[in-house]
Image (tube, rainbow, N blue to C red):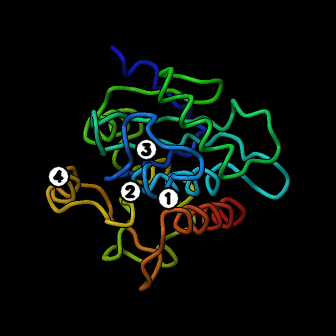
Amino acid sequence: MYMKKLIPSENHIVFILKASQAVTAPIFTSKSLASLGGRMDLVARAIIAAIAKKSGIRKNILFISIFEGSPNPPITFIIDSNKFHKTVISEKNVANIILTTLRNKSSSVAYILNASFREIITYCLNLFGKKKTVYLCENGIDIRTLPRKYIDQIRVFIIGDHRGIDKENEKWLEKKGLSKICLGPISYLASHVITIVLEEKTRAKENS
């Protein structure tokens, strides 16, 4: 029943970040994201990459991150760019949003679900289907070799943090029949992955 809150529209682009060390309680500050936050700085930067653009806030982005650090893993943090009213956001702004949401289970732009990585993926697969859901990894098909029409149709992008996605869950994703896509031979941080994906989506939309 709790998953009913997670209903992206057909227009949403969904980024799912598995944050293996991100803490599951408000035990950090905006100045200790990387240390006490369990590399929450990576989550904050990924959020900024997903929803911020030069002219303001990018619409129709749903950013989902599964926090798997102590003390009460896992929990899922969800932020919807359509709920943003600010035109400029910083890492400090995002840190405060995460902290507020962890304390209160929700904020003006985000909320928490007691859901695991597999539950979130299963929900999105049921909603969008596996043809519109992809796993971004280093040993996938180069995104630049794919048809523009196909890239334009993808709605859900699954991303690992600096540790990547563990082998057990990677095998589970493979059993689900998800396509594996890479951005080239270099390993990128999640925020850079999101930036590149959005650029490719823009190109695909313009040329499809």
Please state which of the two labelled residues, at mark 1 or mark 2, is closer to the viewer. 1
> On the picture, is 33 further left or further right than 208?
left
Q: Label 2 belongs to which residue?
A: 134
Q: Label 3 belongs to which residue?
A: 65
| Quadrant position of the N terminus in the picture | top left
Q: Are marks 3 and 1 in contact (CB under 8 Å)?
A: no
187 in relation to 196, above or below = below
Indicate the amino acid at tag 4. Answer: Trp
**Label 2 neighbour load within 10 Å: few <14, some 14-19, many 20+:** many
Q: Is residue 132 visible?
A: no
Going from the N terminus, do you reach mark 2 or mark 4 first?
2
**Label 3 neighbour load within 10 Å: few <14, some 14-19, many 20+:** many
Q: Secondary structure at mark 2?
A: strand
Going from the N terminus, do you reach mark 1 or mark 4 first?
1
Indicate the amino acid at tag 3. Answer: Ser
Q: Which residue lies at the image location 44% right of the left edge and 49% below the top edge?
A: 37
Residue 170 in the image: x percent, y percent? 21, 59
- For the residue pair 192 and 24, the one nearer the viewer reads as 24
Indicate the amino acid at tag 2. Answer: Val
Q: Label 4 belongs to which residue?
A: 172
Query: Among all residues in the image, which is located at the extreme right?
Result: 55
Q: Are marks 1 and 4 in contact (CB under 8 Å)?
A: no
> On the picture, is 132 further left or further right than 75?
right
Measure the alpha-carbon separation of dots 2 and 4.
13 Å
Q: Which residue lies at the image location 52% right of the left edge and 77% below the top edge?
A: 144
Measure the alpha-carbon separation of dots 3 and 1.
11 Å
| Quadrant position of the C terminus in the picture | bottom right
Indicate the amino acid at tag 1. Answer: Leu
Please state which of the two labelled residues, at mark 3 or mark 4, is closer to the viewer. 3
Q: Label 1 belongs to which residue?
A: 42
Q: Secondary structure at mark 3?
A: strand
Residue 153 in the image: x percent, y percent? 53, 52
